[in-house]
Image (cartoon, rainbow, N blue to C red):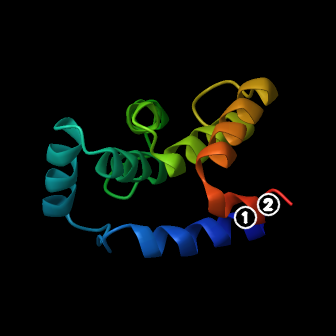
Amino acid sequence: MKGAVKYLDSIRALNYDQVPLSSYDNMYQILKDAYSGDAIKQNIAGEYYENGYLEDADYHRALYWYLKAADQGEIYSMYRIAMMLYNGNGIPKSSVYYLAYLCMFAMYSQKSRFILH
């Protein structure tokens, strides 16, 4: 699974703006865009909260933003939800839902075929 995470990080670097994760100004702008419906910024907001970049990790807020982004078809948020379900971060572990979100990620991402082989 570590190889999959490294692969996803390399894809993410190609598809997202390079956003420094240590500034409150950046967080404000990201949240402003996330609230206005930008799926990529919603996913980044989820990463801020899940990883605790500016405060302690808040898995419930992270899940909220990941679900908002996933509803719009943002594939990396589907992967993050799957990993939260797999690890039980802030939510109960669920192999059924983990596989469902992982399958959605695979279905929406042509590049994910390299991860699942």
* Badge 2 vs badge 1, beta-carbon distance below 8 Å: yes
Left or right of 66: which side holds 21? left
In what element is the residue under mark 2? loop
Residue 48, image x, y percentages: 38, 52
Residue 111, image x, y percentages: 64, 63
Query: Few, some or many C-alpha atoms within 10 Å of disc 1 (few <14, some 14-19, many ≥20)?
Result: few
Image mark for residue 4? 1
Query: Few, some or many C-alpha atoms within 10 Å of disc 2 (few <14, some 14-19, many ≥20)?
Result: few
Q: Name the image quarter holding residue 115.
A: bottom right
Q: Is residue 26 above or below residue 40?
A: below
In whole angstroms, how far apart are the C-alphas of marks 2 and 1? 5 Å
Left or right of 43: which side holds 54? left
Left or right of 32: which side holds 11? right
For image coordinates 13% across by 61% down, the residue present is 25
Camera-side residue of 62 and 5? 5
For image coordinates 59% across by 46% down, the residue present is 108
Which residue lies under the disc numbered 2?
A: 1
In what element is the residue under mark 1? helix
For image coordinates 41% across by 30% down, the residue present is 64
